[in-house]
Amino acid sequence: MRCWLAALWLGLAPGLAMAGAQRYEALADSVRAQLQRAVADRAVPRLAFANPMEGQLWLKAMSQRMARFVADPFEREELLATVHYEASRAGLDPELVLGLIEVESRFRKYAVSRAGARGYMQVMPFWREVIGERDHNLFSLRVNLRYGCIILRHYLDMEKGNLFRALGRYNGSLGRPEYPTLVHTAWKARWQLEATPSAARVARN
Protein backbone atom coordinates (compact mmCIF):
# COMPACT_ATOMS: atom_id res chain seq x y z
CA MET A 1 0.00 0.00 0.00
CA ARG A 2 2.83 2.40 0.88
CA CYS A 3 4.55 1.78 -2.47
CA TRP A 4 1.27 2.36 -4.32
CA LEU A 5 0.72 5.66 -2.51
CA ALA A 6 4.32 6.70 -3.22
CA ALA A 7 3.88 5.97 -6.92
CA LEU A 8 0.62 7.92 -6.97
CA TRP A 9 2.26 10.88 -5.21
CA LEU A 10 5.15 10.97 -7.67
CA GLY A 11 2.87 10.64 -10.68
CA LEU A 12 0.36 13.28 -9.69
CA ALA A 13 2.58 15.95 -8.20
CA PRO A 14 5.16 16.96 -10.85
CA GLY A 15 5.65 20.40 -9.34
CA LEU A 16 6.30 19.24 -5.80
CA ALA A 17 9.37 17.93 -4.04
CA MET A 18 9.84 16.23 -0.70
CA ALA A 19 12.98 18.01 0.39
CA GLY A 20 14.10 17.60 3.96
CA ALA A 21 17.14 18.64 5.91
CA GLN A 22 20.27 16.77 6.89
CA ARG A 23 21.00 17.34 10.57
CA TYR A 24 24.36 18.35 11.97
CA GLU A 25 26.12 15.58 13.85
CA ALA A 26 29.65 15.83 15.20
CA LEU A 27 32.13 13.89 13.08
CA ALA A 28 35.24 12.07 14.18
CA ASP A 29 38.40 13.82 12.94
CA SER A 30 39.25 10.91 10.67
CA VAL A 31 35.79 10.93 9.09
CA ARG A 32 35.87 14.70 8.64
CA ALA A 33 39.27 14.50 6.94
CA GLN A 34 38.07 11.75 4.61
CA LEU A 35 34.98 13.75 3.61
CA GLN A 36 37.04 16.91 3.15
CA ARG A 37 39.37 15.10 0.75
CA ALA A 38 36.40 13.83 -1.24
CA VAL A 39 34.79 17.28 -1.48
CA ALA A 40 38.09 18.77 -2.67
CA ASP A 41 38.05 16.64 -5.87
CA ARG A 42 38.62 18.73 -8.99
CA ALA A 43 38.68 16.04 -11.68
CA VAL A 44 36.57 16.64 -14.78
CA PRO A 45 33.25 14.73 -14.53
CA ARG A 46 32.96 11.88 -16.99
CA LEU A 47 30.87 8.78 -17.54
CA ALA A 48 32.44 5.96 -15.54
CA PHE A 49 32.02 3.17 -18.09
CA ALA A 50 34.81 0.92 -19.30
CA ASN A 51 33.18 0.84 -22.74
CA PRO A 52 32.32 4.29 -24.22
CA MET A 53 29.45 2.78 -26.23
CA GLU A 54 27.82 1.51 -23.04
CA GLY A 55 28.12 4.99 -21.61
CA GLN A 56 26.43 6.57 -24.61
CA LEU A 57 23.59 4.05 -24.49
CA TRP A 58 23.08 4.79 -20.79
CA LEU A 59 23.17 8.54 -21.43
CA LYS A 60 20.60 8.28 -24.22
CA ALA A 61 18.21 6.13 -22.16
CA MET A 62 18.45 8.36 -19.10
CA SER A 63 18.11 11.55 -21.16
CA GLN A 64 14.83 10.31 -22.61
CA ARG A 65 13.53 9.60 -19.13
CA MET A 66 14.66 12.97 -17.82
CA ALA A 67 13.01 14.96 -20.63
CA ARG A 68 9.80 15.33 -18.61
CA PHE A 69 11.77 17.23 -15.95
CA VAL A 70 14.51 19.03 -17.95
CA ALA A 71 13.66 20.30 -21.43
CA ASP A 72 17.11 21.27 -22.68
CA PRO A 73 19.00 18.21 -24.03
CA PHE A 74 22.43 19.77 -23.40
CA GLU A 75 21.49 20.52 -19.79
CA ARG A 76 20.28 16.93 -19.39
CA GLU A 77 23.52 15.52 -20.77
CA GLU A 78 25.69 17.65 -18.48
CA LEU A 79 23.55 16.76 -15.46
CA LEU A 80 23.58 13.05 -16.24
CA ALA A 81 27.32 12.89 -16.85
CA THR A 82 27.95 14.67 -13.55
CA VAL A 83 25.51 12.45 -11.65
CA HIS A 84 27.16 9.35 -13.06
CA TYR A 85 30.66 10.54 -12.20
CA GLU A 86 29.94 11.77 -8.68
CA ALA A 87 27.75 8.78 -7.78
CA SER A 88 30.26 6.27 -9.13
CA ARG A 89 33.22 7.80 -7.30
CA ALA A 90 31.17 7.75 -4.08
CA GLY A 91 30.29 4.06 -4.58
CA LEU A 92 26.61 4.79 -5.27
CA ASP A 93 24.26 3.63 -7.99
CA PRO A 94 23.82 6.63 -10.32
CA GLU A 95 20.24 5.60 -10.98
CA LEU A 96 19.50 5.63 -7.24
CA VAL A 97 20.89 9.16 -7.11
CA LEU A 98 18.58 10.17 -9.97
CA GLY A 99 15.64 8.84 -7.97
CA LEU A 100 16.76 10.82 -4.94
CA ILE A 101 17.12 14.02 -6.99
CA GLU A 102 13.63 13.55 -8.43
CA VAL A 103 12.13 13.33 -4.95
CA GLU A 104 14.32 16.03 -3.37
CA SER A 105 14.11 18.77 -6.00
CA ARG A 106 12.31 17.51 -9.12
CA PHE A 107 15.58 18.34 -10.93
CA ARG A 108 15.35 22.06 -10.11
CA LYS A 109 18.83 23.52 -9.89
CA TYR A 110 17.82 26.44 -7.66
CA ALA A 111 15.35 24.63 -5.40
CA VAL A 112 15.40 25.79 -1.77
CA SER A 113 13.50 23.97 0.97
CA ARG A 114 11.82 25.60 3.95
CA ALA A 115 14.75 24.37 6.04
CA GLY A 116 17.25 26.06 3.69
CA ALA A 117 18.49 22.96 1.82
CA ARG A 118 19.75 23.89 -1.64
CA GLY A 119 20.00 22.67 -5.18
CA TYR A 120 19.43 19.38 -6.96
CA MET A 121 20.28 17.19 -3.96
CA GLN A 122 19.04 19.64 -1.32
CA VAL A 123 22.28 20.03 0.60
CA MET A 124 22.18 21.92 3.87
CA PRO A 125 24.60 24.89 4.02
CA PHE A 126 26.21 23.77 7.29
CA TRP A 127 28.07 21.07 5.34
CA ARG A 128 30.30 23.76 3.80
CA GLU A 129 31.65 24.57 7.25
CA VAL A 130 31.93 20.91 8.28
CA ILE A 131 33.64 19.33 5.25
CA GLY A 132 34.06 21.99 2.58
CA GLU A 133 34.75 25.69 2.16
CA ARG A 134 32.56 28.62 3.09
CA ASP A 135 32.50 30.01 -0.45
CA HIS A 136 31.34 26.77 -2.12
CA ASN A 137 28.26 27.49 -4.20
CA LEU A 138 25.68 24.80 -3.44
CA PHE A 139 23.68 25.83 -6.51
CA SER A 140 26.61 24.86 -8.73
CA LEU A 141 25.83 21.58 -10.51
CA ARG A 142 29.15 19.92 -9.75
CA VAL A 143 29.44 21.19 -6.18
CA ASN A 144 25.89 20.22 -5.26
CA LEU A 145 26.16 16.70 -6.64
CA ARG A 146 29.60 16.18 -5.12
CA TYR A 147 28.36 17.15 -1.66
CA GLY A 148 25.11 15.23 -1.99
CA CYS A 149 26.75 11.98 -3.08
CA ILE A 150 29.46 12.22 -0.42
CA ILE A 151 26.86 12.88 2.28
CA LEU A 152 24.68 9.94 1.20
CA ARG A 153 27.76 7.68 1.11
CA HIS A 154 28.63 8.86 4.62
CA TYR A 155 25.15 7.99 5.89
CA LEU A 156 25.29 4.58 4.20
CA ASP A 157 28.57 3.88 5.96
CA MET A 158 27.08 5.05 9.28
CA GLU A 159 24.14 2.69 8.78
CA LYS A 160 26.32 -0.22 7.63
CA GLY A 161 24.73 -0.28 4.19
CA ASN A 162 21.08 0.00 5.31
CA LEU A 163 19.72 2.11 2.44
CA PHE A 164 16.37 2.92 4.03
CA ARG A 165 17.99 4.23 7.21
CA ALA A 166 20.62 6.14 5.23
CA LEU A 167 17.91 7.80 3.14
CA GLY A 168 16.05 8.68 6.31
CA ARG A 169 19.16 10.41 7.65
CA TYR A 170 19.68 12.19 4.35
CA ASN A 171 16.18 13.64 4.50
CA GLY A 172 16.18 14.28 8.25
CA SER A 173 13.34 11.80 8.71
CA LEU A 174 15.11 8.78 10.18
CA GLY A 175 12.63 6.20 11.41
CA ARG A 176 9.79 7.27 9.13
CA PRO A 177 9.16 5.22 5.96
CA GLU A 178 7.63 7.83 3.66
CA TYR A 179 10.76 9.40 2.21
CA PRO A 180 12.81 6.20 1.69
CA THR A 181 9.76 4.64 0.04
CA LEU A 182 9.38 7.59 -2.34
CA VAL A 183 13.05 7.47 -3.37
CA HIS A 184 13.02 3.70 -3.76
CA THR A 185 9.84 3.87 -5.87
CA ALA A 186 11.22 6.60 -8.14
CA TRP A 187 14.50 4.71 -8.54
CA LYS A 188 12.91 1.39 -9.45
CA ALA A 189 9.99 2.73 -11.51
CA ARG A 190 11.70 5.44 -13.54
CA TRP A 191 15.47 5.27 -13.44
CA GLN A 192 16.72 1.73 -12.97
CA LEU A 193 17.58 -0.03 -16.21
CA GLU A 194 17.15 -3.79 -16.37
CA ALA A 195 20.91 -4.07 -16.88
CA THR A 196 23.34 -1.21 -16.48
CA PRO A 197 26.81 -2.38 -17.60
CA SER A 198 29.73 -1.17 -15.55
CA ALA A 199 27.58 1.11 -13.39
CA ALA A 200 28.56 1.44 -9.75
CA ARG A 201 26.14 -0.11 -7.27
CA VAL A 202 25.89 0.62 -3.58
CA ALA A 203 29.19 -1.13 -3.39
CA ARG A 204 30.12 -1.09 0.26
CA ASN A 205 26.91 -2.49 1.75
Image (cartoon, grey):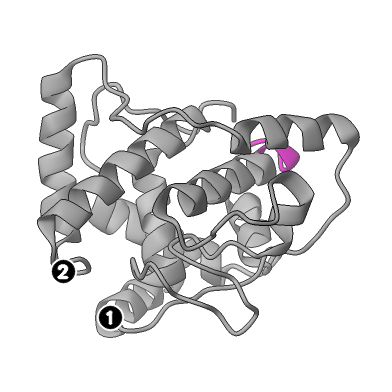
Quarter placement of the C terminus: top right
Marking on residue 14: 1
Marking on residue 123: none
Quarter placement of the N terminus: bottom left
The reply to whether residue 162 is in sight is no
Looking at the picture, does residue 200 appear above or below residue 25?
Answer: above
- Span colored in magenta: 157-162
Residue 3 coordinates in the image, percent (x, y): 40, 68
Locate residue 128 relative to residue 204 in the image: left or right: right
Mark 2 packing: few (<14 Cα in 10 Å), some, or many (20+)? few
Q: CA distance from mark 1 to mark 2?
A: 9 Å
* Element type where label 1 sits in the image: loop
| Residue 159 lies within the magenta run | yes
Earlier sequence position, callout 1 versus callout 2: 1
Locate residue 7 relative to residue 112 in the image: left or right: left
Marking on residue 68: 2
* Element type where label 2 sits in the image: loop
Residue 164 coordinates in the image, percent (x, y): 59, 53
